[in-house]
Image (cartoon, rainbow, N blue to C red):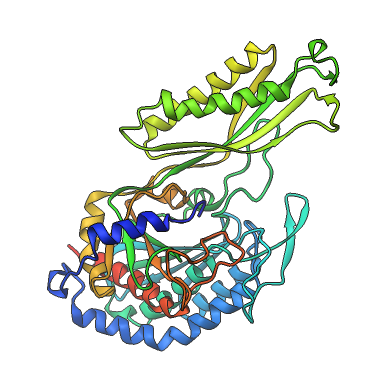
Amino acid sequence: MHKPLSAIAIAAGLVACGLTFVSSAQAQALDAAGLQAIDAAVNAVAPKMVNWRRDIHAHPELSGQEVRTAKLVAEHLKKLGMEVQTGVGGTGVVGTLKGGLPGKVVALRADMDALPVLENTGLPFASKAKANYLGKEVPVMHACGHDAHTAMLMGAAEVLAGMKAQLPGTVKFIFQPAEEGAPVEPDANGKVPSFGAKAMIEAGALKDVQAIYGLHITSNLPGGVVGYRSGPLMAGSDNITIHVEGRGGHGSSPWATIDPIVAASQVVMGLQTVVSRQLNISQEPAVVTIGQIQGGTRYNIIPDKVEMMGTLRTFDEDMRQEALKRITTTAESIAAASGAKASVRFGPVAYPVTTNPAQLTQASLPALNLAMGGKTMVIPKVAGSEDFSEFQKVVPGFFYFLGAPPKGKEFAKAPPNHSALFDIDEDQLPNGARSLAALAVDFLQRK
């Protein structure tokens, strides 16, 4: 995930909206008896989920390098008697559980990759791992909860495998690599091979699937509370790279140069008008941020070129396309006014908006409320991004958040995702497995 939830916005939502409590009688397909069977199986597998999570946390692997994690997952699914595919879209794993009765096909997804972050949690199972990241050795940490996602889906797989004879259809368990981004650098044209969800789709992971469910754990919701919304939930994300070319020279004689640093500074300021003056943000919010600028080698030398990198976040595809055009035009025109030349490239991260279809959302809520004891709430839009959205482009998909701040931490003050201090309450692992299993069973049983 590429940005944490806003704890302030969530707190406001809790006050304004309250929690939604729904009785089990409202469940369309999954009933209290069905949940009781799931619950018993989840309780039995709960200690295993803690052990899996800690093992994966202590041995994190970067995007595209999830070899050990994939092996752990594949061996577990094989022991459960599933058909297992490995190497799907890189290091991805797909387990197929065919129920004892004919029916639909539903998928559950977890991501497996970690981040280049030096862990500072002090946990007894804290990561000491290092790995190669774009040519550099870096520390590696599960700073976004993907270790928990993998453990919860492994638990859900064991729960549903124990119900195989009663399942009216098929469940696919999709363990995805590289959600955090491209595992390789782009070529000169900004192109990289498909990665993450997109690569798994191209490899056939969604074949015959009619719906897919996924979740993301967060420290910025109260423990045991699910946050969701219908429609746009998480922003689409586009990497921005801008090269500004000028003509270098001595810092004492700027008139003999075309200063790309000054031109780049003007481009940065001009890009702020894309959102504030050029897009209709009464329709949906948008964000343009430049987070990195590189240029120059010495205090009194004007360089030939400057490179800057940033991100665009949008919640509507038409607005996204408009923003891409306006970013390009703004950068090129401002640079040209200084006699410089700007070239704009987008990617390799170009995630669509994570959008929960209204029909699937409404149909899934009774089972989700039943599984969570009614502890669900509608949350504000999240400016972070998720490539679960790639799955949603192919089949209807429902994505939600599960609150799991560490014990003793207020959710509004807990270290967010991607922090070196990020940690979770492992008591929420059963809630994740229970909700995923419940949604799968409910979908298969629902007419």
Residue 404, placed above or below residue 309: below
Q: Is residue 23 left or right of residue 77?
A: left
Percent across and percent down for residue 83 are 47, 70
Residue 103 visible somewhere in the drawing? no
Horizontally, residue 327 falls left or right of residue 257, namely left
Please tell me which residue is depicted at 20% across the width and 66% down the height of the picture: 366
User: Looking at the rendering, which quadrant does residue 419 occupy?
Assistant: bottom right
Which residue is at the front of the view, 286 or 210? 286
Considering the image in quadrants, where does the C terminus appear?
bottom left
Q: Position of residue 222 (x, y in %)?
A: 37, 69
- Residue located 39% across and 45% down the image: 393
x and y percentages locating residue 178 in the rendered image: 58, 55
Q: Nearer the viewer, residue 184 or 167?
A: 184
Residue pictured at 43% horizontal, 84% vertical: 46
Q: Quadrant of residue 129?
A: bottom right
Q: Position of residue 138 (x, y in %)?
A: 74, 59
